[in-house]
Amino acid sequence: MIRIYLLFFLFFWCANLYPNSIDEIISKPVRFYAPSEYKSDAQVWSISKGEYDDVYFATNEGIVLYDGVRWEKYVTPNECIMRSVFYDEENKVAYSGGVNEFGYWKYDEYGNLQYTLLYENSPSAPTQEFWKIAKVSGSHLVYFESPLSLLVYDTQTGKTTPLEDDGMRFHFLFIVGNDVYVQQSNYLYRLDGYEKRVVTDQLENFYSVYMTLTGNGKLRLFSSEKGSLLLDEKGNVEKRISYETDMRITSMSRLGEDYLVGTGNTGFYRIDEKGTVLSRIGEQMGLKNTVLSVGVNNRGDIWLGLNGGIMMIEESVKEESLLLDPQENIGYVYCAVNQKEQLYVGTNKGLFRVNKADKQVNFALVPESKGQVWNLYNIGDEVIVAHNKGLFSVFNGMFREIKHSGVYALVPVPSRPGYYISGNYVGLSLYEIKDGKLVFRNNISGYGDLVQNCVFDKDGNLWIAHSRRDYMRLRFNDDYTSIVESEIYTVPTTVSKRAFQVKVGNDLIFMNNEGGVYKYNELNNTLQPDEYYATLLETINRNILKIQAFDDRFWQINEDGVCLLQKNYNKVRVNAGLFARMKDKFIPKGFRKVIQLQDSIYAIGLENGLGIMNVAALNGQPSMKQPHIRKAEIVGESENVLLSLKEGNLFIPAHINMVRLWLTSLNRSQQVEYRIVERGDKWETSSGGYVQLSYLHSGDFTLEIRSSNGYGIYSDTNQIMLHIASPWYATVYAYLFYGLLVVGTIFLIYRVILVQTRKKEEKIRLNEERKRKEEMERYQLSCLQEELGNKNSKLMSITMLGVQNNTFLKKIKDAVLEIDTNQSPATRQQVQRLVKDIERQLNDQSGWDNFAEHFNNTCNGFFDRLIEKHPKLTNSDLRLCAYIRLNLSTKEIASLMNVSSSSVEMAKYRLRKKLELDESVALPYYLTEVIATLKSFVNN
């Protein structure tokens, strides 16, 4: 949605202005807003100014609000068609009336308008359309008028009461001074609370559309087409005043002493007390449809609600105005000069003349002047024209050639009054005035380059600024026929692409668009920095396209507009952003310049016209308004969230990266500066009607905002308190939780330490008990080991004794068997008996049983465990196991078992099979593992 800027013009034929003033033909800027821009229906039925720069509009689709920066549309829950709107300054609410309902709108804490329904017509009742709303200051009654009824809303009780119905239709409602009036048929009533007081009954066939008080306090009524009436103190018609033109009035308002009149057929008028039309905007000037409503905002701008959009006449812009060609045919304007009753305008299409005495502006092409006009000069009674075809003069409508071939500029020769030098497409030329006319004298030899910008210094030298960023100083011979001396001067530069030279009184200063300011130093013949002018021009000496000086006024032309610096003794005033609204119509930037038309009237060339600046009105401007915050919102990735704004306090949640503040009450450039005081921030600049804050930390801060013109002029500062919430982990409750957590943690640590201490003590106690027990066990073990050793020794002794006995018996047996028994039978018998006894003794098992019992007890149930694991073992197997357990040798085992050693080996082999031992397992090791350990033995 693009704002459509249409610059029309409003003509003021003001008798109090002196004759031939340029003020007689200039106009006010006008803006047209299409329905697509304000996002509502084309028909605008009512307009009312609100707080600050707010303006309310009633349309078929709802209420439209313009806050001076942006448009918003609001719709009631019933999507009511709106017919009227009225802002109550006392209660700061906007009442609206529509089809079958009325209510009021009020800003909420988020900066949005919220609707409260006050009255809704019954569905069975006839349709009512509330066209007018009235409330006077100090009253608590609000009147809502429809043709069928007049309803009164009491703001104190909240009740809505209809006025007594006398059967007559109501015809509009008017506020005049501190009174409210209503017309019914030919009667005019003044409303006194809930009562109607007759003012006059002489309004037959006269239907009022507006009422006001005259300067002497009399009522004046305006009809749609039948002129106006003036009533005396008794209500009698004192005078009837006809309209000067055939117009059908649809709406009216006042601005100062003048009447603002909207019509249904001939556009918009501004009329004085006598009914004289002061100005008009009609179809020829862009107003092509009916004016349904007229209003004035707090700035003094005029708003027109049309049948197809909204138009604003920037009446508050006292200093800026326009002079445009209605036919849009004159092209780019490069220069202009004001001469008596004529205004001459030079363009890329030729020289045009405007007769200021004409009732309608007409740009007439001067015959034979077609082509590019670069500059215009008033010399005597002639207008001198620097043209691409040469130098010409205009006198009494005649276009006379002075010199053939292109001329850019003309400058007077200071040392020779009546002589002029022209800067040409090629070289320089000399002219003189003869018989009151400028005539060509001679070309000047010695310089053959292009000359666009040249100026004389106080010593009579001509300085030329070159496009290649240097300057040339020329000295002429006495008769100005040739150049006797030329020298080129440069200044330090890096990226500068433009060189400027400006004549200020007798001073000639040199500048570039990097901010350098220089003067010529005669002693060392160089350009040196000049501190005085550098300081004076510091605020405007940046981004320069051109700089010009008119006495103590310095005009700086930049990309976005024009800046004016005025010096008054030791004070400097800077106005920036001048002509900014017209920048889309500027001529090419290399040729832009400020044109002085009168002492305080300046102009700048536009496409098909001139932008006009009245410096006197500019200096009389009120100071800039203090900006106000309209809305605040969190800028999110997908959508924005509005923030609450109460009484200058803005509450922002934690962890917000960006907040945007929408502003109102701004200057035309919408440029503001802002800073957060507590952070020590520097002032930052923002434009576009908003301020954006980022990287916000928790805490309370003071945000300062002020309007700025960008050149050191500021409005009063508005302060807003920012309350940025702490994150959840840094709130009071969080800190309370942290305190409890710390206390709980300390207590827990204490409990843990206490438990661990107790456990440690218990562990120490148990260790001590264990140590005592182990010592006791070791002592018992020692005793048992000693006892076991004694038993083992005893067992081994018994075993070894048995081995010795058996060995001894075998020896005896062998000895006995060696006895020769062949000699005596008796000896044989005795030997045999003895051998049997020895054999019986060797095979006696009674000794083994005692040994087995003793061995089993001593070795912790060795046989019991062995039999439990290997129940198929025989007594011989158990005996062999016991001997192996005692670590006896095969020979000793053979002796005890009364068998041969090979028999013992075989027995061991069979025993391994029975025990199912792997070859890698030693038989003695296995038998040792089978029996109980020493510890088990001790425990038992």
Image: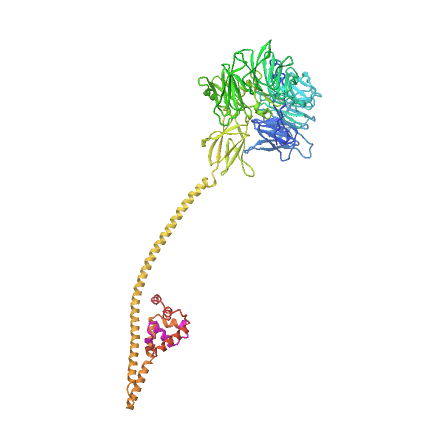
Residue lying at the far right of the rendered structure: 205
Residue 884: percent from the left, percent from the top?
A: 35, 73
Quarter of the image that includes the N terminus: top right
Most extreme residue toward the top, as rendered? 435
- Nearer to the camera, 845 or 271: 845
Q: Is residue 750 above or below residue 78?
A: below
Q: The C terminus appears in which quarter of the rendering? A: bottom left
Determine whether, in the image, residue 156 is placed left or right of residue 538: right
State the residue in front, 423 or 632: 423
Residue 870 locus on image (x, y percent): 41, 72
Magenta span: chief secondary structure: helix
Q: How far across and how far down the image is residue 249, in percent?
A: 68, 22
Residue 870 lies in magenta, yes or no? Answer: yes
Q: Nearer the viewer, residue 462 or 509?
A: 462
User: What's the coloring here?
Assistant: rainbow
Q: Nearer the viewer, residue 709 or 305?
A: 709
**Residue 158 appears in the picture as rendered:** no
Q: Would you place residue 755 above or below residue 823 in this image? A: above
* Relative vertical location of residue 530 with respect to residue 928 in this rendering, above or below: above
- In this rendering, would 14 be left or right of 679? right
Q: Position of residue 685 (x, y in %)?
A: 51, 29
Is 856 covered by the magenta stretch?
no
| Image quadrant assignment for residue 53 | top right
Q: Residue at x 29, y 72 (%)?
A: 794
Q: Which residues are magenta?
A: 867-893
Q: Quadrant of residue 119?
A: top right
